Image (cartoon, rainbow, N blue to C red):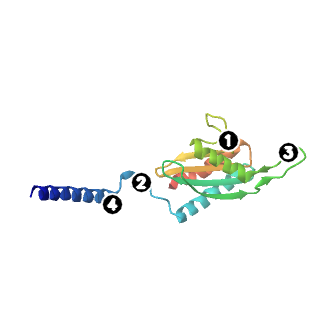
Amino acid sequence: MKIRLIDLGMLFALSLAVIQTRALSAAGSPDEKAAKPVSAKKFDALANKALAAMKQRAAELKIGGVAVVSYALGDSMQGWTSKMAVVGRMKDEPSATQKGSNLIGIAYAKSAEMAETLQNSGTAKRPPMTGEFGWQGGVIARTRTGYLIVAFSGGKSEDDVQVSQTGLEILKSAL
């Protein structure tokens, strides 16, 4: 009889624990609700808008190059969604004195540096790692649900930053 009462008591306690766990997981924590992924359709529309604004700013500055906008969900970089646009040119041709530049590669290198440091490109308090240049021209911002990473390559560093900041403002307004 005592064993059955103990068994029933344990079963009752276990049932309450399961019910409470299910209720909590169904409700979700406030952080889980805040960190809903942005739909691909919504990001695509916002990315197009940001890239268009970046193209316009680059034209105002009379520069060309490559623009990249990215969104990473969550508190740490585990993946991102990105979109890239060529703004007039995607490379600088080699010459007798220059080896040329792959502007797509440079823009993504700036993005990669920001993903690792969570700081604007070229501002890390450490030397660039292999695969990074340490060049300015990319900006990053924390949002309620993740990180926005925007980079431009093709002009002088200060111009690249201005173009990137233009794209970031568009994304920040909606995410």
Alpha-carbon neighbours of circle 2 within 10 Å: few (<14), some, or many (≥20)? few
Residue at the disc numbered 4: 26
Type of the residue with mark 4: Ala
**Around disc 4, counting alpha carbons within 10 Å, would you say few (fewer than 14), some (14 to 19), or many (20 or more)?**
few
Mark sitting on residue 34? 2
Residue 146 is situated, as x and y percent measured from the top left of the image, at 50, 51
Question: Can you give x and y, in whole percent of width and height, for residue 111 in the image?
Answer: 63, 48
What secondary structure is marked by label 4?
A: helix
Residue 133 to residue 45: above or below:
above
What's the distance in space between the residues labelled 1 and 4, CA to CA? Answer: 44 Å
Tell which residue pokes out farthest to the right in this image: 96
Q: Which mark is residue 136?
A: 1
Asked which secondary structure carries label 3, the reply is loop
- Secondary structure under tag 1 reads loop
Of the image marks 3 and 1, the number of the one nearer the N terminus:
3
Residue 60 in view? no
- Circle 1 residues within 10 Å: few <14, some 14–19, many ≥20: many
- Looking at the image, residue 142 sits to the left or right of residue 69; the answer is left
Q: Which residue is denoted by mark 3 in the rendering?
A: 98
